[in-house]
Image (tube, rainbow, N blue to C red):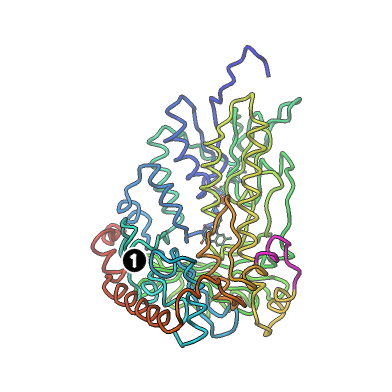
Amino acid sequence: MDPTQDPRIRTVVIVGGGTAGWMTAAALARLVAPGGVKVTLVESAEIGTVGVGESTLPHIRAFNERLGIDEAEFMKATRATFKLGIQFNDWARLGDSYIHPFGDYGAPGGEVPFHHYWLKGSRTADIGPIDDYSLPVVAAREGRYAPPSDDARSLMSTYGYAYQLDASLYARFLRTRAEAGGVTRIEGRIVDVTQDGTSGDIRSVTLDRGDVIEADLFIDCSGFRGLLVEQTLKSGYQDWSHWLPCDRAVAMPCASDQPTVPYTRATALEAGWQFRIPLQHRVGNGYVYCSSFVDQDAATDRLIGRLEGEPLKEPNHIRFQAGRRTRNWVGNCVSVGLSGGFIEPLESTSIYLIQIAITKLIELWPDRRSAATDAEEFNRQMDLEFERIRDFIILHYAATERTDSPLWNHVRTMTLPDSLAGKIELFRERGVVQEYREGLFLHPSWIAVYLGQRVVPRRYHPLADHRADKDLVAALLRLRGTIAQAAGRLPTQDAYIARHCAYDRSAA
Ligand SMILES: Cc1cc2nc3c(=O)[nH]c(=O)nc-3n(C[C@H](O)[C@H](O)[C@H](O)COP(=O)(O)OP(=O)(O)OC[C@H]3O[C@@H](n4cnc5c(N)ncnc54)[C@H](O)[C@@H]3O)c2cc1C
């Protein structure tokens, strides 16, 4: 770089206007643009967006808060519902059902994690499933919701929540904020990309009508195609489809007159799984499947046959390959969203990965002298995020006992990544969840899925023996009753939304 040049990033181009593009634009408008950085977003209506992605994780609340977004306004604008967890049906065995909650098991306190007490108690008496010891699970099953409490001693503090939202309305909502914050939106299809002859950095993108747009930093939010990071910069792709063989999805929203439940449902089918995401005005549905075991027409028929109401759109067919870019940040280009990789939406992790990429990009905001070291650190952190999520998703498949179809036979018997095999063994042997500092999914999430998938520890923690069997069982049953009562006192989610954040049906 020429030492007389100003090293600061002055101009940024975001390529793509899906959820990733507009989340990035809104964040940059708020956090970076006030420092004098000019942000431009290019999107193509002709290409469109992937058109799915509606179930989120609790982290999105921190993202919205950082942007100064009012929750009720956001819920109305995106016709969102609250989400206390994900219900998994038929995963370990046909007929099984459990909820992975956004919260803890048991009440605050205890010498060892609650599941050890539950394991000990369930060896001596019929104390019910661990689901009964989680307030968010019991509330979710009954369709109830109220915001958690800040009082750490209260049972009402034992959970968090996320949203189920209309992704296109969320993008529109963020667009309004981004444009108000100074982001320039350009409609057009990028047909050419030019690079610096020496560094290989991206110099400019050219639109179909001939405009050339230059920038110091490019953010690739172009979706699966990875227009800049892959097609131009050849980052490379790590293929994980041998562990996660689903490679297609068909999605189709439908009408519903049922009460909205505060959870997303994932039902395992013969060749994949079906999602159901209830919003205020409709339900999002999809069948994520493996094309080696079912063809597109059969998958579409299977989904349509399972819809609970009138379809509201034609089926949206999507192809993907599980994996991630070898480098998410290359030169002066950072990939955010599907352009950076994709792990199937079983645990609603993609929007989280968008958010985390934006957060890390802002933390490591480069100038033109430091981009290489920033990129290295960004890539290290994103690798960890992707791999932790990958292992967690594989667990849902690997820990199945199903033998009823080729997909389940394949995943039940596949060789696991070493990073996961060790974790499962540790839990199976001693009920211990392996700790890690960076990355998503903390103890309660792993416990929910291990136990829900019938990975039951051989031993519980010896400290649980400090409590006599009889006393422990009595205390557990009391706690179960307290949780049931606390859940029963909450309003239904529909009543809560009607009171606080229902969208305006007359304006729809
Ligand atoms: C079946 C399925 C279900 C999912 N469910 C969930 C979920 O429940 N929760 C979750 O967190 N995530 C989910 N995801 C992932 C989620 O959909 C995506 O992470 C999210 O929508 C972000 O997509 P994107 O913005 O990266 O890409 P896209 O939505 O594909 O946007 C790409 C943008 O780039 C533009 N573009 C591309 N090429 C050009 C060009 N040449 N010139 C100009 N513009 C261009 C397009 O016009 C578009 O605006 C799901 C994904 C699938 C496949």
Q: Where's residue 507, x and y in %? A: 28, 57
Number of numbered discs on residues? 1
What's the magenta region? 414-423
Pointer 1 residue: 155
Secondary structure of the residue carrying numbered label 1: helix
In which quarter of the view is residue 254 placed? Answer: bottom left
Query: Which residue is farthest top?
Result: 4
Q: Is residue 324 magenta?
A: no
Pick the residue in front: 507 or 66: 66
Q: Quadrant of the C terminus?
A: bottom left
Give residue 96's quadrant in the image. Answer: bottom right
Instruction: Please say if 168 is above or below 317.
Output: above
Describe residue 236's horizontal placement relative to residue 226 as left or right.
Answer: right
Q: Main secondary structure of the magenta part?
A: helix
Q: Position of residue 49 (x, y in %)?
A: 54, 52
Q: Residue furthest left?
A: 499
Q: Decide if residue 488 is on the left or right side of residue 237.
A: left
Instruction: Say whether residue 220 is left or right of residue 505.
Output: right
- Residue 78 higher or lower than 220, as above or below: below
